[in-house]
Image (cartoon, rainbow, N blue to C red):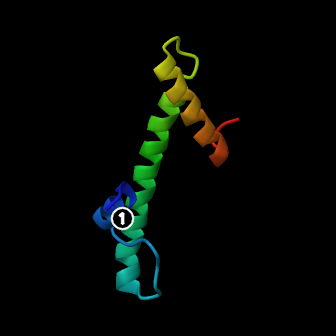
Amino acid sequence: MDYYEVVKKLIGPIEPVGETNTDNARFENLVNMIDLMENMLADIADVAERETAPEYSVSRAGKEARKFLKSLGEIE
């Protein structure tokens, strides 16, 4: 099981199915998934800010984080 599968199992399904009770629960799951993603993106943005660090490993991580955020259109 990879990280994605673990998170999906922990949060639960997010896709609405057209049944009110099920969709209410799935809406809460969606809100939780969005909250998690916001926090994860903030963590990645923190790493991206360090792309000019003098240490190679820190700079490498920062550049990778910035590349990812650019691909999402989160930064220029």
Horizontal side of 25 relative to 37 (left or right) equals left
For residue 30, which quarter of the picture?
bottom left
Mark 1 neighbour class, 10 Å CA radius: few under 14, some 14 to 19, many 20 or more: few
Q: Which residue is mark 1?
A: 8
**In this picture, is 53 found above or below 73?**
above
Q: Could you say where residue 4 lies in the image, as x and y percent from the top left?
A: 39, 59
| Looking at the image, residue 8 lies above or below residue 38 | below
Give the residue displayed 36% in from the left and 63% down from the top: 5
Q: Residue furthest right?
A: 76
Residue drawn at the location 49% of the way across and 42% of the way down: 41
**Viewer-proximal residue among 48 and 56:** 56
In the picture, which quadrant includes the C terminus?
top right
Q: Element type at marker 1? A: helix
Task: Tell me where residue 40 appears, x and y as whole percent.
Answer: 43, 44
Q: Is residue 21 above or below residue 2?
A: below
Q: Quadrant of the N terminus?
A: bottom left
Determine whether, in the image, residue 20 is placed left or right of residue 66.
left
Point 45% across, 51% down: residue? 37
| 56 over 46 or under it: above or below | above
Q: Position of residue 25 (x, y in %)?
A: 34, 74
- Return the residue nearer the eye: 47 or 37: 47
- Name which residue type carries label 1: Lys
- For residue 63, side relative to residue 1 (left or right): right
Q: Tell me the residue at 60%/34% (across/down).
A: 66
